[in-house]
Image (cartoon, grey):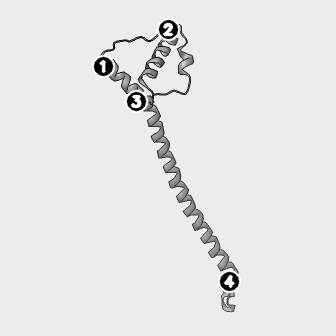
Amino acid sequence: MLKNFRLSQKTIEELREIASLLGISETEAVSRAIHSYYLQLKGEEGYATSGAIVPFSEYKKTQEQLKQAIYKLGELEGRLKEKEELIKELRNRIKEIETKPKRWWEFWK
């Protein structure tokens, strides 16, 4: 049975914003809101909010932090690679010096 409801302009704008943020239809947003309110009235809201649904702003904030962390990890990996190359080069130079035959007059130094 279909039923029509009248909403204020402000409520309609809020509904559209929620639907847009969640990427769902306005009908689905209303359905979820009613279901959430129903669970809250029954005292079962803890079960509904314990899932993976988070506010979109928190999701975007976490995504940005993750992006920055990955960028910093990349920078650190680059620095580590540079240091490893320097260490390798120094070891090769030390081997060269150690294996290079000394001249006869350098034995007394």
Label 3: few (<14), some (14–19) or many (≥20) C-alpha neighbours in 10 Å: few
Above/below status of 19 relative to 66: above
Dot 1 falls on a residue whose secondary structure is: helix
Residue 82, quarter of picture: bottom right
Dot 3 falls on a residue whose secondary structure is: helix
24 or 69, which lies in front? 24
Spatial CA distance of label 4 from label 3 is 72 Å
Q: Which callout, 2 or 1, points at the residue further toward the start of the chain? A: 1
Q: Which callout, 4 or 2, points at the residue further toward the start of the chain? A: 2
Q: Position of residue 26 (x, y in %)?
A: 41, 23
Residue that carries the numbered disc 3 in the rendered image? 20
Disc number placed over residue 41 in the picture, else none: 2
Above/below status of 93 relative to 25: below
Quadrant in which the C terminus appears = bottom right
Q: Which callout, 1 or 4, points at the residue further toward the start of the chain? A: 1
Viewer-nearest of discs 1 and 4: 1
